[in-house]
Amino acid sequence: MVEEDLARVSQFGRWRGWIVVDGKRTNIEPELWWGQRDRSWGLRSEMRTDETRPPVATHRNFFWTWSMFQFEQSALSIFIKERTPGKPHYLSGTEFRRETDGSVSHREVTSVEHRIEWADDPLGQTIAVADFTFAFERGEPRRVRMHGLPTRFYLKAGMYGGLQGWTHGDDRGENHAAHDVWNLDDAATRAVARTLSDHVVRLESGNETGFGISEYGVAAGYPLYPGPQKFPAM
């Protein structure tokens, strides 16, 4: 039986345009607005963590992160899933670098080491600081230190795993629209939002600094990070 059959693209960029929120317009200029795009097409397996629409899946014994790191002259995309520390059962990643002649070079990630300090967050899994060491098919390894910033975008609001009876792909009609306002300091709200988020991060790598986003989770049974396992990973 086929569980997943999809194509996926991750893209770095600098954005230009404008956003209006509550009647206030904010202009977006590429010098200040760095972003990532994550798209997939095809069939994806359901996480099924919506308790209002059983059955609910139990996710155990894994660590994973999908992270997009940007610097002025380089960028790193990484997706890793582990059940045993240091032995990923899924790994994909690429470093891109803007060369002096305007071209862009790239090299593929072959292994990743990680050491994570978890924040004292009473409501969920939150990375305070993480150190990554990336090895490539050629050249020297690269070390990146990641600092979690306050801003996070919780993917449960986008129906990841399902939310209050909704799941990805549900048809609610051509013009259906709805929204919620969440107080993320509220324990009950965070229990619904869970951990999965685009966590905005600040980066240090050698003499380069940058920003990015990191999605991550650690589930019960993964031996390296027992502390945050008391909270649902997804």
Image: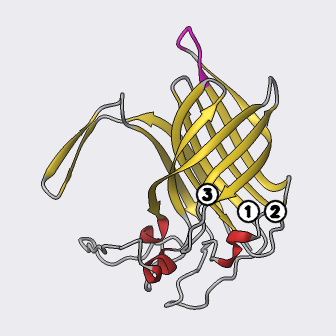
Q: Which mark is residue 63?
A: 1
- The answer to whether 116 is drawn above or below residue 204 in the figure is below
Q: Residue at point 75% right, 51% down?
A: 115
| Amino acid tagged 2 | Leu
- The answer to whether 199 is drawn above or below residue 161 in the figure is above
Label 2 secondary element: loop
Tell me if I can see residue 2 in this picture: no
Q: Which dot, 3 or 1, sits closer to the camera?
A: 3
State which quarter of the image contains the C terminus. Answer: bottom right
Determine if the magenta segment contains residue 130.
no
Residue at far top of view: 101
User: What's the CA distance linking mark 3 and mark 2?
Assistant: 14 Å
Q: Residue at point 15% right, 50% down?
A: 24
Residue stretch in magenta: 97-102
Q: Which mark is residue 127?
A: 3
Colouring scheme, one of rainbow, by chain, secondary structure, one colour = secondary structure
Q: Which mark is residue 224?
A: 2
Residue 198 x, y percent position in the rendering: 50, 56
Q: Disc 3 or 1, which lies upstream in sequence?
A: 1
